[in-house]
Image (tube, rainbow, N blue to C red):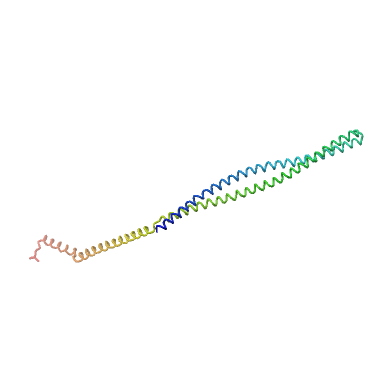
Amino acid sequence: MNFFKRLFKIGEAEAHSAIDKMEDPIKMTEQGIRDMKSDLEKSLEALAQVKALAIRSKNETEEFLVKAQDYQQKAMLILKKAQSGDIAATEADRLAKEALIKKEESSKHASRTKEESEKFDKSVAQLEKNVQEIKQTISKYENELKTLKARVKVSKATKNLNKQMAEIDSSSTVSMLERMKEKVIQEEALAEAYGDIANTSKSIDEEIDKAIDLTEANAEDDLAKLKEQLGFNKDNQ
């Protein structure tokens, strides 16, 4: 019997230790979620910055393309003026050449900014993917945390219930119930005995009253007294 008690105490101690250790995963998970939310904020900030760079690169590409086209138009107008005699041919060639150089520079800038824009777009796509993964992970961990907290509550409630059940002394409880049952039976028997005694006493009184007719005896006494008052005596009778 002592062996089983010791075994139960060991199991109970291990159960308590397991429950206590379950607090650590909860705190760790909560901290992990806070860390991921902090990472999410940083990722969103980085995403916004890269998107801004991508938008700026696209705008610059359009601006350089417009400039390149503009320099192309200017070079053509200069050559037309030279053809019409408004500008000297040598001067027109020089200016047209400078315009074409500017056009080439703008075209190169447009190509460079276009490449940068494409790189930024890839970075934006990657960052958006990372942000989505972090959001999904946070949602997953939050759901797991809810489940873990619920399991801890159930475990604690089960532990307390089992503890209460283990502490119940069934033998003493049964013994107490038997003593109470015996006492109730004794009280019921005693009550029945008193009832029998009361009924017996009542029956005897009834028999005595029946044997002696008190009404007839009283009438005889009253008749004797009345005769005495009237002067009747035995001789008159």
Residue 89 lies, in percent from the top left, at 91, 34
Determine whether 236 is above or below 139 in the image: below
Which image quadrant is residue 219 in?
bottom left
Q: Quadrant of residue 162?
A: bottom left
Classify residue 68 as left or right of residue 212.
Answer: right
In the picture, residue 105 is in which quadrant? top right
Task: Identify which residue, 184 or 45, lies in the foreground.
Answer: 45
Q: Going by the image, does 181 lie left or right of 237?
A: right
In the rendered view, tell whether residue 68 sits above or below residue 210: above
Could you tell whether 178 is left or right of 122 in the image?
A: left
In which quadrant of the rendered image does the N terminus lie?
A: bottom left
| Residue at the far front in the pictured view | 3
Give the x, y percent position of residue 75.
Answer: 86, 37
Residue that protrudes farthest toward the left in the picture: 235
Residue 10 in the image: above or below residue 237: above
Between 85 and 10, the one nearer to me in the picture: 10
Pinpoint residue 10: horizontal percent, then vertical percent.
45, 54
In the image, 175 versus 210, the foreground residue is: 175
In front here: 78 or 219? 78
Q: How many numbered badges does the structure rendering display?
A: 0
Q: Position of residue 184 (x, y in %)?
A: 32, 60
Quadrant position of the C terminus in the picture: bottom left
* Left or right: where 209 falls relative to 133: left
